[in-house]
Amino acid sequence: MPGCAGTETPTGEKMATQSEFSAPPGENSSRVGTLIRSRGDQLLVLIALFAIWQACSLWLGTYWVGSPWGTVVRLTTGVLGGELLSHASFTLAEAVIGFLLGGIPAVILPFLLRRLPIVTAILDPFMVGGYGAPKLALAPLFILWFGIGIESKIALVAITVFFIVYFSTLSGIRALDTKLVQMAQIVGADEKDVARHIVFPGAVPYIFTGFRIAMPYAIGGAVVAELISANRGLGYLIQLGAMNFDTTGVFVALLATGIIVFIGNTAVNVFERRLLRWRPPSDAKNQSGT
Amino acid sequence: MSAQALLEVHDLGKRFASRAGRDSSLWVIRDLSFSVADGEFLTIVGPSGSGKTTLLNMIAQIDVASGGEVRFQSEVAPINDPKSLNPGLSCRIGYVTQEDNLLPWRTMLQNVLFPLVVQGRLNDETRARAEMLIRTVGLAGFENHYPHELSGGMRKRASLIRTLVYDPPVILMDEPFGALDAQTRTVLQEDLLRLWNLGRKTIIFVTHDITEAIALGDRTLVLTRAPARVAGEHKIDLPRPRDIRGILTDPKFIEIYQRIREQVQ
Ligand SMILES: Nc1ncnc2c1ncn2[C@@H]1O[C@H](COP(=O)(O)OP(=O)(O)OP(=O)(O)O)[C@@H](O)[C@H]1O
Ligand SMILES: [Mg+2]
């Protein structure tokens, strides 16, 4: 499988583009072919990753790198036993609540500011600052403010998601086609109709790009906040594993995090595909990866 | 004829705000005057880039004039003040733009119904009218296609009937049949004439095609190269109803054609 070695994750978007090039575009049958091919390629990458992992674990010893088999067994028993599942769902809950608390205002705010370009301009440097500020540095502060419970993790996730989604929504509103707005006004659309029928639908692809980028950060943010201080969640498991020199335990938690990110990404894709049926397929494919 | 003129354009001028390094005093339209009577079918021909689209944009009030006057009924359009524009003059002026401007997230049928939706006039009767128009322009069967799934000519036809569907008393058309094959074009020209005959709308129709301008219009304006002004005005006194296919061999047609031909550089 030449050319696949650079692809790091089985969910990655590089895979899809690669098979796009190898399959003749346009025809219906080739779409299915592309799908099978890209799924097949992904499986190969997954196997390759496991092979490298296994090699590393043999080479360095399971003390440093937990073996894939051991990790998968621990993952399965952890899930079946319910313990891992409860930690994972705790992390997931933080990520989901934080995603909603940060994401919803981030979608609404640019729409409210649309008619207030001066306010938007005043806010801009602060928003850019907030976007660029390392969120990890905020984690200790949030723990100080909100305690070591779920609240501080939700706050960290929310703030991380907010800035990403805010800027992508804003760029969606800025990409507005004024010709479409003029057309709508001519046929009798008022300000509210324009917002609802032109500005919002036009921004939806951008909002989803924001969601897709923010989603792994939401889960990562929750895990990192737990790493610093928590008594539950996957981050806590990683911390616990590291403290007890249980590398396999760390790997189990990392693998579980990866699986959650994958599921989250699939969910965003499914949702997006339903909402964006109107897009030409090439656009849709570039947007949604797989 | 200014006594019962519906629309009057007087000494109209337009220049676009300059960007750095460009001459700011470049007028696209200068001292352009003409008027349109109620129920008239006016056609406008002029070379590419002469400012035809710009002129229609100002009449439809999606762009402001830099000087002169555009008067519709008794209302004067704002000059140099984009904020007080009233696009479409409260649905009294429809505009079939040069580009189709269909909403990509709406199907063809939803696009055609869009004016009725925002005007709150969607009911069984208007819906039936939309369906009738879709059949007339040969788009039946494509109701649920999104714009990117339609051909350029189909999109053009969809945008045409999106304006016809809400029946505005005045319609501006910017080369609506430019992207169509000769056969479809003739069919649509005939349909347009029939519609115009029925409802006696006022139509301002921009085209590159002198034949089309004569076949459809009561009067044809010829514009000069930019800065655009009126190079000539031609009354088309061919009898109506006209036979679009047969008209080409009419000696009177040929005579008008040659007169216009000389003025269009
Ligand atoms: N927004 C704009 N900014 C600057 N210049 C413009 C703008 N719109 C049009 N122009 C200029 O105005 C002139 C007339 O343009 P317009 O689109 O009205 O021509 P037209 O007669 O419709 O041409 P065509 O027949 O090719 O459609 C052109 O020279 C164009 O460069
Ligand atoms: Mg034009």
Image: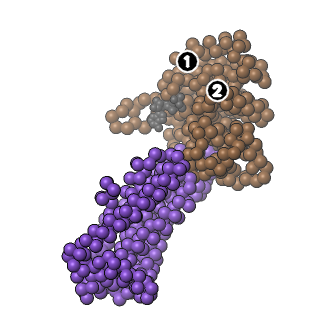
Chain colours: A purple, B brown
Residue type marked 1: Val
Residue in the image at 56% along x and 26% along y: B32
Left/right placement of residue B241 relative to residue A117 reads right
Which quarter of the frame holds ligand 2? top right
Q: Position of residue A59 (x, y in %)?
A: 20, 74
Residue B43's disc number: none
Q: Nearer the viewer, residue B265 or B1?
A: B265
At 64% across and 35% down in the image, what residue appears? B172
User: For residue A136, what is the image quadrant?
Assistant: bottom left
Q: Nearer the viewer, residue A135 or A219?
A: A219
Circle 1 SS class: loop
**Category of crowding for the residue at label 1, using alpha-carbon neighbours closer than 10 angstroms: few (below 14), some (14–19), many (at least 20):** some
Q: Which residue is mark 2?
A: B182
Q: x%, y% of residue B68? A: 55, 32
Element under disc 2: helix
Residue type highlighted by circle 2? Ala
Q: Please determine if labels 2 and 1 lie on a single subunit.
A: yes
Q: Residue furthest left?
A: A60
Q: Nearer the viewer, mark 2 or mark 1?
A: 2
Residue drawn at point x = 37 percent, y = 70 percent:
A217
Q: Are marks 2 and 1 in contact (CB under 8 Å)?
A: no
Please state, as top left, top right, bottom left or bottom right, where the N terminus of chain B lies in the image.
Answer: top right
The residue pinned by badge 1 equals B264
**Residue B122 locus on image (x, y percent):** 73, 53
The answer to which quarter of the image holds residue B169 is top right
Count residues near mark 2 (Cα–Cα under 10 Å), then give few for <14, some for 14-19, many for 20+: few
From the top left corner, tell me how far across and down residue B107 is, in percent. 62, 50
User: What is the tally of numbered marks visible in this picture?
Assistant: 2
Gap between marks 2 and 1 measured at Cα: 22 Å
In the displayed structure, B170 sits above or below A166; it is: above
Q: Is residue A251 left or right of residue B97?
A: left
Residue nearest the viewer, comparing A38 with B75: A38
